[in-house]
Every structure is written in C-alpha cells, then in structure tokens.
C-alpha cells in the first residue's frame, strides 16, 4: 500500500503534495478496499501510527500535504481554530451553500426600518436569516 500511495505523491523540499484524486474541498482521496479515505489521515496511519479516538489529523505546515512530519493529531476545535487563524475556513459567500454575497449582507444591514419579511422576500432567504444577519449572529465577519 505504501508504494501505491507514494506513486501519487510529489515530494518538494518541505511538503509532500498529493497528485491523485482530490475531494471537492481540495483534500486528497485514496481508496483502500473500495473505501475513499482522506490522504493526510492515511499518511498519518502509515508512518506515524493509529489516530486516537475523537481526534483529527492537523497540518502543521498549513498546506494540504501528506508529509508525516507535517501532521499531528488534535481536537476538532483546535483544527477549526487553526483554519480561522489561517483564513482557510470557508465562511460567508465562500461557502458552497451561501445564498447571499457580502455586499448583499451589508445592504440588508443598512436598511434599518424595513421589515425582516420584506427583506427576506427580496433576497430569497428566510425571515430568521435576515434577523440573524441584522443581529450579527450570522455573517459576523462582514463589517
């Protein structure tokens, strides 16, 4: 399995870049016994060891590489904190499911006095979403 895995890896001076199949989120995918697994998890298990229950594999280099020296385990909360710090966490209009743009969110927030229902109808979202935008529960990063 190591040989097959490494046949899809391009080693640079630092990172090991995955050249095989890629998921929609940009992470590598490797099939074992008909099951698609994330490559950084496979690399960790091949060269470092078993991933402890409840932990995820994090990238120290902040790249989606498979160099086992760049991988470590941590909690999902630590992983999300890394992504927020690095700016790699999809949020707002970068989310595949986003119905609004940042410009539309600013427009909604600037329309003080208009009913949430009228805004919801105009922008094609729920009244609750409008409320969450205005109260900054959603789209917090938009100023």
Image (spheres, helix red, strand yellow):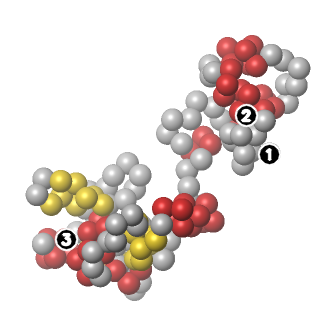
In-image side of 5 versus 85 (left or right) = left
- Label 3, label 2: how far apart the Cα atoms are: 45 Å
* 116 up-or-down from 133: above or below: above
Element marked by disc 2: helix
- Please report whichever mark, 3 or 2, sits nearer to the chain's N-terminal start: 3
- Label 3, label 1: how far apart the Cα atoms are: 45 Å
Q: Mark 2 points at which residue?
A: 133
Q: Mark 1 points at which residue?
A: 143
* 109 up-or-down from 42: above or below: above
In-image side of 3 versus 88 (left or right) = left
* 42 up-or-down from 143: above or below: below
- Please report whichever mark, 1 or 2, sits nearer to the chain's N-terminal start: 2
Q: Point out the frontmost of discs 3 and 2.
A: 2
In the image, what residue occupies the spot 73% across and 15% down?
A: 117
* 90 up-or-down from 84: above or below: above
- Please report whichever mark, 3 or 1, sits nearer to the chain's N-terminal start: 3
Q: Mark 3 points at which residue?
A: 5
Element marked by disc 3: helix
In the image, residue 78 lies at what x, y percent?
54, 67
């Amino acid at each position: 399995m190591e040989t097959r895995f490494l046949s899809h890896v391009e080693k640079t001076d630092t990172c090991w870049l995955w050249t095989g199949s890629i998921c929609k989120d940009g992470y590598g995918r490797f099939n074992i016994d008909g099951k698609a697994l994330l490559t950084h998890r496979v690399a960790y298990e091949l060269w470092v060891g078993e991933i402890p229950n409840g932990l995820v594999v994090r990238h120290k280099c902040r790249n989606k590489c498979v160099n086992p020296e760049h991988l470590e385990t941590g909690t999902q909360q630590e992983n999300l904190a890394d992504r927020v710090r690095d700016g790699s966490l999809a949020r707002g209009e970068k989310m595949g499911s986003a119905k609004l743009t940042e410009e539309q969110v600013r427009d909604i927030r600037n329309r003080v006095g208009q009913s949430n229902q009228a805004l919801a109808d105009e922008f094609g979202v729920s009244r609750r979403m409008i409320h969450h935008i205005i109260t900054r529960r959603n789209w917090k990063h938009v100023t």
